[in-house]
Structure formats: structure tokens, C-alpha cells
């Protein structure tokens, strides 16, 4: 097998396994799912709080309930899916577009700013 096919297979196996685990186990009711250390120590939600519960609800078809757990993660997932598709889909013009417009320092800086803004907003408004 070529390295690319092996990597894709490994990626699919990991994603498939994690999807099955989160489909079968509700993170809100399961003891072994990791809890947010920041929330436990400080009482403030981190930008990633609710992602596991979001994933669980989205897998069960309740997308709206899932998004309510973490609005920012929904945006990040869409961005990640577009990026991943840009590397998996063998259309050179699409891959070139992704690399030129979605993988650059301005997008990285924008992400970092949005990340911090989301962190502040979710704790001020208690979202």
C-alpha cells in the first residue's frame, strides 16, 4: 500500500472508532469521558466545553441541540470538513483553492481572535 492510502485508512479507522464510541456512550452520563479541568478548577468554561456532548447529539440526529452545546465548535467542524475534503478530493483546482484561501496566516490569526472572543463571550453570557 502507498503511504497515502495507509494514512487515509488509519484516519478512517480512528474516526470510525471514535464515532462508534461517542454514538454508544453519552458523555454527560458516562464516567470515563474526560471532564473539563478548567471548568472544575476555575468555574469558567473553556472554548471547547460541550464538544463531546455536541458530537453525541449530532450523531443521534439532533443537530440543533448539539450546536447549542458549543456554537464555536460547529463553525470549526465545518471549516475542518472543508479542509479535509480539500486534501482527500483529488481535484487539483479545489485543493489549490483550499491551500491558497483557507490555509494561511490570516485565517490562523482570525481563528485565534475568534477563539479568544468566544471564550470571553461564553463566560460573560453564560452560554
Image (cartoon, rainbow, N blue to C red):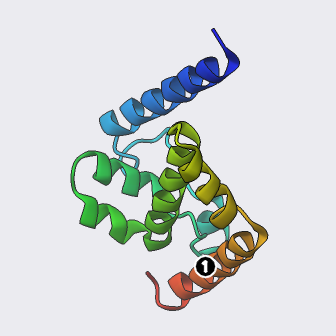
The residue wearing badge 1 is: 119
The image position of residue 126, as x and y in percent, is 46, 84
The residue closer to the viewer here, 21 or 9, is: 9
The image position of residue 95, as x and y in percent, is 59, 49
Q: Quick check: 111 above or below 103?
A: below
Residue depicted at 66% across the width and 73% down the height:
111
- The answer to whether residue 84 is left or right of residue 105 is left
Residue 75 in view: yes
Residue depicted at 66% across the width and 14% down the height:
2
Q: Quadrant of the N terminus?
A: top right
- The answer to whether residue 121 is left or right of residue 3 is left
The image position of residue 108, as x and y in percent, is 72, 69
The residue closer to the viewer here, 113 or 119, is: 113
Q: Residues within 10 Å of mark 1 (few under 14, many from 20)?
A: some
Residue 50 in view: no
The residue closer to the viewer here, 45 or 14, is: 14
Q: Quick check: 110 above or below 54?
A: below
Amino acid at each position: 500500500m502507498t503511504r497515502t492510502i495507509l494514512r487515509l485508512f488509519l484516519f478512517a479507522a480512528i474516526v470510525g472508532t471514535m464515532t462508534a464510541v461517542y454514538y454508544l456512550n453519552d458523555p454527560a452520563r458516562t464516567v470515563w469521558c474526560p471532564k473539563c479541568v478548567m471548568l472544575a478548577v476555575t468555574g469558567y468554561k473553556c472554548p471547547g466545553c460541550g464538544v463531546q456532548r455536541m458530537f453525541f447529539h449530532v450523531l443521534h440526529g439532533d443537530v440543533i441541540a448539539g450546536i447549542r452545546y458549543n456554537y464555536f465548535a460547529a463553525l470549526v467542524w465545518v471549516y475542518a470538513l472543508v479542509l479535509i475534503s480539500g486534501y482527500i478530493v483529488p481535484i487539483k483546482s479545489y485543493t489549490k483553492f483550499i491551500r491558497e484561501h483557507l490555509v494561511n496566516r490570516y485565517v490562523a490569526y482570525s481563528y485565534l481572535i475568534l477563539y479568544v472572543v468566544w471564550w470571553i463571550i461564553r463566560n460573560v453570557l453564560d452560554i
